[in-house]
Image (spheres, rainbow, N blue to C red):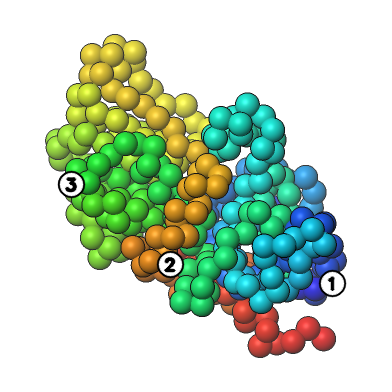
Amino acid sequence: MRAILLTHPKRVEVVDDWPEPEPAPDDVVVAMRSVGLCGSDLGVYDGQRTTPDLPWVMGHEGGGEIVAVGSAVTDRHVGQRVAIEPNYCCFRCPACRAGRTSACPDRAIVGINVGGLLAERVAVPARFTWPVPDSVPDVALACVEPVAVAQAAVRRSGIGPASECLVVGAGSQGLFTCQALLAAGVQPFVTEPNAERLALAERLGAKPIEPAEQRRFPFVFDTVGVPAAWDTSLRAAEPGGSVVVIGMSSQPVQLSTMDLTRRQLTLAGSLIYDHPHDFAATVTSIVDQQLVPEQVLCEATPAARADEAFKAAATSPGKTWLDLTTWREVPHA
């Protein structure tokens, strides 16, 4: 079986002898069609996030077609197209029992602490696959997971229709956040130093704004997470406003308790999404075309050129993704 492997930091290889997945009774085997790349994947690629082993199969945003089902699976079938929800919560811990599965300390995180999706076929717990109709194109399967992240952040913020907000950063997560806000009836403004990314955000319906402008917003969504972006986000929040942080960095940021208190700010971190409601809502919004996430995607990269995709992902306007259906054009020897 072919797979895309991280063999050393910043070194990706395509192999044709990776072991076939063995489904457990509650699993399905999915023949992958498309996989998106995000900042978490780049952290693994760069060696900033360690993996249990090398070589390692990366990737967590994607979907494909079920080609086998485990002996206990009754609600999925061969031939079904599915998006994969790549965070497998335990369902037992206090966080899971409270419905906040995103905080599960025992999550299996695909591509991080369990093998990823960049292979011809992968075994996935059936309950973490989401059927999609043929009307949803393969390319959209690479977007469902990051859109769920964006929509969960919008839900948690409490922002309502007809509001205005600022999105800091127009990388792929910032662009999906703009889409999620627009679908919710919210007008996002966006700040981004990369002109191509800013232009793409504007084409989606966001309004560009310069960081130096003194305008304040009731809601700010920080999709970057680095100190420079944090300073922009903090300055842009109006008194009594909310800052929702989606982007992550290990670098500390500055905030005085005096500033926090006097301005009566609400700060919230939004981590992934909560199973099953957030992913279900995202699948529905894509099926109903409330948003069209493939508008954010770059041109497809075939599996054979995966190394190019990883090198380009950090700076490309739009989301980088791999088209794994190209493997079918070159049959395995």
At 52% from the left and 42% from the top, the residue drawn is: 274
- 253 left or right, relative to 264: right
**Residue 75 screen position, x and y as percent:** 67, 62
Label 3, secondary structure: give it. loop
The amino acid at mark 1 is Asp
Residue denoted by label 2: 287
Circles 2 and 1: CB atoms closer than 8 Å: no
Q: Residue 299 location in percent, x, y?
A: 46, 74
Task: Tell me if residue 288 comes above or below residue 325 in the rendering.
Answer: above
Residue 47 in the image: above or below residue 139: above
Which of the numbered marks, if any, corresponds to residue 212?
none
Report the mark closest to the observer, 2 or 1.
2
The quarter of the rendered structure image containing the C terminus is bottom right
Q: CA distance from mark 2 to mark 3?
A: 24 Å
Please tell me the numbered disc located at residue 17.
Answer: 1
- Label 2 residue SS: helix
Assess disc 3: are there few (<14), some (14-19) or many (≥20) residues with their C-alpha within 10 Å of its C-alpha. few
Residue 162 is marked as 3
Q: Amino acid at mark 2?
A: Val
- Determine whether 17 is above or below 84 in the image: below
232 left or right of 76 in image: left
